[in-house]
Image: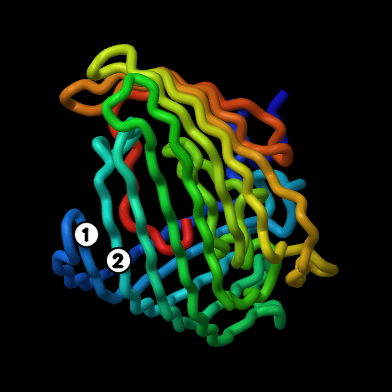
Amino acid sequence: KYSSSPLFFFEEQKPAFLRQREVTGELRLGMPAGRKGTLEAGGFRTELRNTYYDSDDFSKTDKNNVTWFTPWRGYMRYERNTLNRKQYATSGSLLSACLSYVTGKENFQPAEAGSDREILQDHSWWELSVRHENYLLNGSRFSPGYTAELFLSDRPLLSNYTSSLGIAKQFNPFPLARTRFLPEFRASNYMAAGLKAAWSISRSSSVRAEAYAFQPLQTIEPGLDNNTRFENISFSPSYIANFALVRHLSPGPLSISASYLGQETGTWVFMINFGYILFNRQQFL
């Protein structure tokens, strides 16, 4: 008996609820600013394409909504970096502050062809991001440290909840977090802080643990018909943590890690990775 379903018997797992594609062109100019510091100014032209479903209860045959957002971004950044490694540092410090202005056009294309829900609108906003990371007891095998981050903006809401969440800034305190879409750690305004500790087994190997609290100053909440709204909340932080065994080799670090990615996902992620977890400069991922 043949199946009447348009799906194959064997094919990929359920597709992602949200897929993001970002193409960016940029121009940057930089200069030294004191010892270990740099001052940088530049601009970006970005084309962001979010493809997503109306809800997370969908099938492979459902059609996608698409939101295009094409902003220009101008920014100025100061950074002072004395960390001893690009990833999984054990000594040094990092101070980064960035002020940006963003202006662009949103084009929402609903799944239903010819629907009158299609939206074209312009958006503009300012944003300020400050991050400080510091390891104490430099030169010791045991290196406790801390990270603090503040993000303030007047980013507007887009035409629906999913696309608004898609351009919200995500808190990424360790490399694995950047590989996941974490709604619980996305907001247009937030503060976050955490403690970390690294124990150097040898010059190239270390064991590390880190845990962070993330507090949005506004949450992005869904409304009727996939609309959205900002909501001010009381103190109710979300928590994220990572434990890792790391060995640094010439091509890059070899790491075995276990990460807790918040109460919303309720999951631990275990990963063995060789090499740097690297990304292009991305505006909304």
Sooner in the amino-acid sequence: mark 1 or mark 2: 1
273 in relation to 264, above or below: above
Q: Is residue 8 visible?
A: no
Inspect the image, locate mark 2, and give the three-letter code of the amino acid beneath it: Tyr
The quadrant holding residue 254 is top left
Distance Cα–Cα, label 1 vs label 2: 7 Å
Q: Position of residue 126 (x, y in %)?
A: 49, 79
Q: In the visual, does 44 lie left or right of 19?
A: left
Q: In the visual, does 230 lie left or right of 178?
A: right
Residue hosting label 1 = 37
Q: In the visual, does 101 lie left or right of 150?
A: left
226 in relation to 263, above or below: below
58 in relation to 123, above or below: above
Q: Which mark is residue 275?
A: none
Inspect the image, locate mark 1, and give the three-letter code of the amino acid beneath it: Gly
The quadrant holding residue 103 is bottom left
**Direction right: furthest residue:** 224
Q: Position of residue 81 (x, y in %)?
A: 27, 50
Q: Position of residue 205 (x, y in %)?
A: 30, 17
Residue at the image position 31 percent from the left and 74 percent from the top: 76
Q: Is residue 108 visible?
A: yes
User: Which residue is nearer to you in this view: 229 or 160?
Assistant: 229
The quadrant holding residue 39 is bottom left
Q: Which mark is residue 78?
A: 2
Residue at the image position 71 percent from the left and 32 percent from the top: 266
Graded by Cα atoms within 10 Å as few (under 14), some (14 to 19) or many (20 or more), the crowding at tag 1 reads some
User: Which residue is nearer to you in this view: 16 or 194?
Assistant: 194
- Which element carries disc 2, helix, strand or loop? strand
- Which element carries disc 1, helix, strand or loop? strand
User: Which residue is nearer to you in this view: 149 or 56?
Assistant: 149
| Residues at discs 1 and 2 in contact (Cβ within 8 Å) | yes
